[in-house]
Image (cartoon, rainbow, N blue to C red):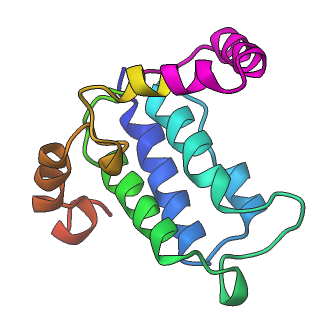
């Protein structure tokens, strides 16, 4: 299920976070609740990893994101505004716990097997898009630069 309203809220909050307009704590307060898997996955696998929640700050100056992190953020924001379904595998909480336990007992082999299977047929370099084609199509009609995203 695609929740356009929640995706738009996360995209706006993410833009503000990356631009240094809001603090990391303000960003956390703006994360929408939704059953759209893109919301949880993009927050957990991208934005939450871009800052430390042990202190309150903006992503400016010495705390500014690296060019690589900014690229991931831009791709995630573009995806949120693309109206595409989230096509990557999504683990339930119980499955994630089981995978973590299996990973411990197999010294990481279970995680590598899961990652291999999860990325098969998908281009990880374009996550959360599934492929370079999806990403290129979204770049041809960016919501924020076309006048349709505000």
Residue range highlighted in magenta: 89-113
Residue 2 shown left or right of residue 60 in the figure: left
Task: Residue at the far bottom: name it.
Answer: 61
Residue 12 in view (yes/no): yes
Indicate the position of residue 89 as horizontal and vertical percent values: 42, 21
Residue 35 in view (yes/no): no
What residue is shown at x 28% (from left), y 60% (from top)? Answer: 149
Image-quadrant location for residue 84: top left
Indicate the position of residue 69 as horizontal and vertical percent values: 51, 66
Indicate the position of residue 114 as horizontal and vertical percent values: 50, 20
Measured along the vertical axis of the image, is residue 110 above or below residue 129?
A: above
Frontmost residue, 20 versus 118: 118
- Quadrant in which the N terminus appears: top left
What residue is shown at x 36% (from left), y 37% (from top)? Answer: 4
- Quadrant in which the C terminus appears: bottom left
Main secondary-structure element of the magenta-colored stretch: helix
Image-quadrant location for residue 121: top left
Frontmost residue, 9 versus 91: 91
Q: Is 69 colored magenta in this rendering? A: no
Image-quadrant location for residue 64: bottom right
Indicate the position of residue 140 as horizontal and vertical percent values: 10, 60
Measured along the vertical axis of the image, is residue 21 above or below residue 118?
A: below
Frontmost residue, 150 versus 118: 118
Frontmost residue, 16 versus 113: 113
Residue 150 shown left or right of residue 113 in the figure: left
Q: Count the marks.
A: 0
What residue is shown at x 70% (from left), y 80% (from top)? Answer: 63
Q: Is 99 colored magenta in this rendering? A: yes
Residue 139 shown left or right of residue 117 in the figure: left
What residue is shown at x 55% (from left), y 17% (from top)? Answer: 91
């Amino acid at each position: 299920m695609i929740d356009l309203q929640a995706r738009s809220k996360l995209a706006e909050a993410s833009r503000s976070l990356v631009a240094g307009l809001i603090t990391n704590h303000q960003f956390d307060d703006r994360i929408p609740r939704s059953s759209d898997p893109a919301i949880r996955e993009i927050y957990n696998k991208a934005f939450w990893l871009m800052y430390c929640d042990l202190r309150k700050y903006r992503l400016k100056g010495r705390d500014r994101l690296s060019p690589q992190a900014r690229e991931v953020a831009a791709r995630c924001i573009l995806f949120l505004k693309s109206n595409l379904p989230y096509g990557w595998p999504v683990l339930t909480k119980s499955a994630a716990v089981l995978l973590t336990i299996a990973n411990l007992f197999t010294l990481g082999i279970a995680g590598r097997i899961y990652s291999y299977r999860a990325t098969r047929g998908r281009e990880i370099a374009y996550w959360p898009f599934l492929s370079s084609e999806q990403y290129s199509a979204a770049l041809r009609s960016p919501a924020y630069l076309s006048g349709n995203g505000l």
